[in-house]
Amino acid sequence: MDYDAPIIDLKSDHYFMGEALRQATKAYEAQEVPVGAVIERNGRIIARAFNQVELLKDATAHAEMLAITQAEEAVGDWRLNDCTLYVTKEPCPMCAGAAVHVRFTRVVFGIGDPKAGAAGGALNLLQFPSLNHQCEISAGVREEECRLLLKTFFAEQRAARRDADPYADPNPLNSQNN
Ligand SMILES: [Zn+2]
């Protein structure tokens, strides 16, 4: 983590994460793993997306990836170096890799993912020394709200599976990954 990052407008992080949470709620309502993302540029949101892996039957359809494509269209360039990504869950290696490719200034996330997160949780691709770009990281913004959505979602999934098959594997770790 970069503890020497410039002073951050916490109110504004709170606001933009709230918009990412609205996207995550849409994913929840669509029975997708509830992760949402928005991309901010000059104080405006230029992209909003939620996880759509099941709907699109596409393992790359994470909220961050969909939002990045939208933002590139909005800016008219693949370079998003004056943009900040807000996402409710710590990005996975695919999304963190994309964040480096588009050169986000900052990546802000809610709940960390110690098993698969690539923003300092399991590994840190956002600040990998030999890559040609590093992103500032702000972790834990509206963490409890982000956590609660995911927790509720997985608890409901487990309950539904138990109802369908009372002898199903009760191990919650078998279905936690996004
Ligand atoms: Zn991802």
Image (cartoon, grey):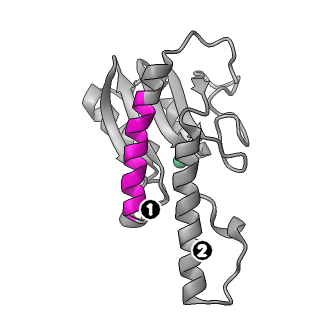
The residue nearer to you, when weighing 116 against 76, is 116
Q: Tell me residue 49's x, y (percent).
A: 36, 45
Identify the residue at horizontal 58%, vertical 9% (top origin): 6
Left/right placement of residue 35 relative to residue 132 reads left
Identify the residue at horizontal 37%, vertical 65% (top origin): 55
What is the secondary structure assignment of the residue under circle 2? helix
Residue 71, above or below 134: below
* Chief secondary structure of the magenta portion: helix
Q: Is residue 164 magenta?
A: no
> Residue 144 — which label?
none
For the residues labelled 2 and 1, the Cα–Cα distance comes to 14 Å
Residue pointed to by mark 1: 32
Q: Which span is picked out in magenta?
A: 15-30
The yes-or-no answer for disc 1 within 8 Å of ligand 1 is: no
- Determine contact: label 2, label 1, CB under 8 Å: no
Residue 75 in view (yes/no): yes
Place residue 1 in its image quadrant.
Answer: top right
> Residue 158 — which label?
2
Left/right placement of residue 5 relative to residue 23 reads right
User: Is the residue marked by circle 2 packed among few (<14), some (14-19), or many (20+) residues within 10 Å?
Assistant: some
The residue nearer to you, when weighing 45 against 126, is 45
Q: Amino acid at mark 1?
A: Glu
